[in-house]
Image (spheres, rainbow, N blue to C red):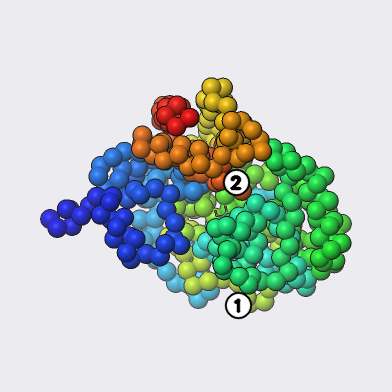
Amino acid sequence: MQREAHLNNAALMARRRAALPSGLGQSYDIVAERAENAEVWDVEGKRYIDFAGGIAVLNTGHRHPKIVAAVKAQLDKVHHTCFQVLAYEPYIELAERLIAKAPGDFAKKAFFLTTGAEAVENAVKIARSATRRSAVIAFGGGFHGRTLLGMALTGKVAPYKAGFGPFPAEVYHAKYPNALHGVSEADALASIEAIFKYDVEPERVAAIIVEPVLRALCDRHGIVFIADEVQTGAGRTGTWLACEQWGVAPDMITMAKSMAGGFPISAVIGRADLMDKPGPGGLGGTYAGSPLACAAALAVLDVFEEEKLLDRSKAIGERLVAGLKKIAASHKAIQDVRGLGAMVAIELFKDGDLSKPDADLTKRLCAEAARRGLILLSCGSYANVVRVLVPLTASDALIEEGLAVMADSFKAVA
Ligand SMILES: Cc1ncc(COP(=O)(O)O)c(C=O)c1O
């Protein structure tokens, strides 16, 4: 009875604030109690449409029955050995299936970690081990995780890096092409040449992490090309991996988030000749590639095939872009509606002026939508982007309902 009395958002948030550090941010003062596909209910019974998907983790939705069943079945067999002590078949099968889905006409290997940041760190470790070089080039605005190397690679000071330095050395940032903010592809390439001129010779660069157009430049200088697909991977962009659409095969790919539908696991998939460079014991982790997460990831692969979720990703993306363009037609603040598959975003500017990114409006819009029962995510270098990462298993009716809430929220805050 006593527990029941305290089950409301305000009381639980007060307990959260007293017990947890404030650095652990939270978008909304809402405490989830249960969830189903693309809907969440809070502890007070209020229902929300989930356009955030646990930040790109729930492409197969909350509690997909097949994934839940696979994890339960695995739980009844073995749930931990530490793979470096005793192997288990789901890990091996998952590596085989992910290798088969990665682009590139060369032998590949894969292994698993627990978080996206760990996958990124391990890809860099392998690139350094294979090339015997130390430097890494990443991009301004990119996010690669909250570990020290993850933060070093991340190209955004506030809130991720401020106060946490010094960071691992020899990480350099180039410009990321962004036409809306005045950075062309030529500018981005020139910024890498500038790093080669002012900071580090290309012969000392082990890896470049992220940008697809850089394959040729990497080849020219023997630099390992890493595609960080932690967020874009597992079907978000309409193909299993976003790099399939770029027509280039990365030397290494990192995955996490939606690859196991919410069970913590990440992957590094890469050229076999690179992946075999670190010596025994150099890679791994106590929980890395846990049997439960491997079982979930195998079920995710099956669900993608059975429910044709790549087609669904494209269709959802088209529906969202069309709906958001309709909203944009009556709101000057929305100056960009973009999408790659179901990775969709809008960008907001004060009075539609591209020199005035509107973080305040973005914040008010998200708060209003949450009040009306829709969970949105804000992001971007200027905190003026709203992104939609709704589960690919969501029905058209639910997506339309969410779009209608967005339209009403815009009207309320504009
Ligand atoms: C592209 C990318 N890389 C790495 C990460 C870090 O993943 P994790 O939070 O699981 O460590 C993220 C998380 O948002 C990401 O989007």
* Residue 9 located left or right of residue 86: left
Depth order, front residue of 27/202: 27
Marks 2 and 1, how far apart in space? 41 Å
Depth order, front residue of 359/140: 359
Q: Is residue 332 visible?
A: yes
- Residue under numbered circle 1: 281
Which quadrant of the structure image shows residue 184? top right
Coordinates of residue 223 in the picture (x, y in percent): 79, 61
Q: Residue furthest left?
A: 1
Depth order, front residue of 350/231: 350
Q: Secondary structure at mark 2?
A: loop
The residue drawn where x is 80% and y is 55% is 192
The residue drawn where x is 57% and y is 68% is 164
Coordinates of residue 377 in the picture (x, y in percent): 48, 43
Which of pointers 2 and 1 indicates the residue nearer the eye?
Answer: 2
Q: Which mark is residue 382?
A: 2
